Image (spheres, rainbow, N blue to C red):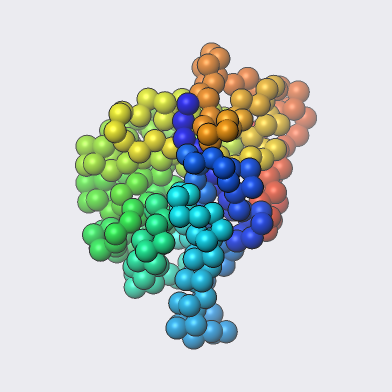
Amino acid sequence: MLNIQYTAYQGLGANCMPKRTGANGKCGIKLSMAGFGHRNSTRSDLEWDSYEAALLTFAREIVGPEFTLMLDVYGSDPNWSGSFDWALKTARILEKLGYLWLEEPLSPTATEEYIRLSLASGIAISGGEDFIALKDFESWSAKRAVSILQPDCTRVGGLTPLHCIREAAHHHNIDLIPHGWNTAVGLAADLQFQATTPEGRLCMVEYMPARHLEEPLKHDPFGLDHEGMIAVPTGPGLGVELDNDRVEDGVGVFDCGEETIELPW
């Protein structure tokens, strides 16, 4: 059984609060609030500081002090303009509020700034979901650019490259949380992979209850128990079986609140 990181991408509000997971002490919610960090001229910097801090505080107050929270600001966005100073300020607010990590607060090309931020921050900094090549993960691990690497199994080439990335990360005392919540096969692979995490290392998977994780499969193996745990599928291979009729007939549709993304299976 693995701990679950419940990924909520619908913005701050009822949709991303832990109605289903609120009583599960081992669950966590990763918040990704629409527009967070994208500042404009409608407010002064001090007003933006106050506004963003209030949102983060509000989320903490809703779930309580014991619930695990993370924040993803998606610095991989080509339009992302968050600076090092903004990232450090945000990290310090999150530290005071007891968040577990700050995800992608900078552009993935800002390696030196990631290094500075990780050294200066009191909470974990995570990133790496857009990287594909092993050398990039090895470089970030050796430089300790982040505390948590987040490779996507469906992007890096499968479980074997993912294992090599984890070896490089652990060699430099960096944790690894796969970023594979967005497809059924990716989640199945993440579960199998994380089940082999060495004792003493951070072990979680990302999970968003949604049709795109259930429709391609004959059976839904991804149900949470009352403690916020998910069983690792025990069937052959990754433990799941594709529903070939559904795969051949169309696409899965993932409604993430702001837009609809079609995912070809």
In-front residue for pair 6/160? 6
Q: Position of residue 176 (x, y in %)?
A: 36, 40
Give the answer, above or below, for where 131 lies relative to 258: above
Give the answer, above or below, for where 138 lies relative to 219: below
Find residue 177 and report its image quarter: top left
Q: How many dots with numbers? A: 0
Which residue is pictured at 31% across the width and 28% down the height?
198
In the visual, does 9 lie left or right of 72?
right
Give the answer, above or below, for where 242 lies relative to 66: above
In the visual, does 177 lie left or right of 168?
right
In-front residue for pair 265/229? 229
Q: Position of residue 35 (x, y in %)?
A: 57, 67
Q: Quadrant of the image for the C terminus?
A: top right
Q: Position of residue 56 (x, y in %)?
A: 49, 65
In the visual, does 248 lie left or right of 99?
right
Which residue is pictured at 70% across the width and 38% down the height?
211
Residue 205 visible in rendering: no
Give the answer, above or below, for where 76 lies relative to 85: above
Which residue is pictured at 44% across the width and 33% down the height?
157
Find residue 90 and report its image quarter: bottom left
In-front residue for pair 233/109? 233
Which residue is pictured at 30% across the width and 29% down the height?
199
Residue 19 visible in rendering: yes
The residue positioned farthest toward the top in the image shown: 236
Q: Position of residue 117 (x, y in %)?
A: 29, 62
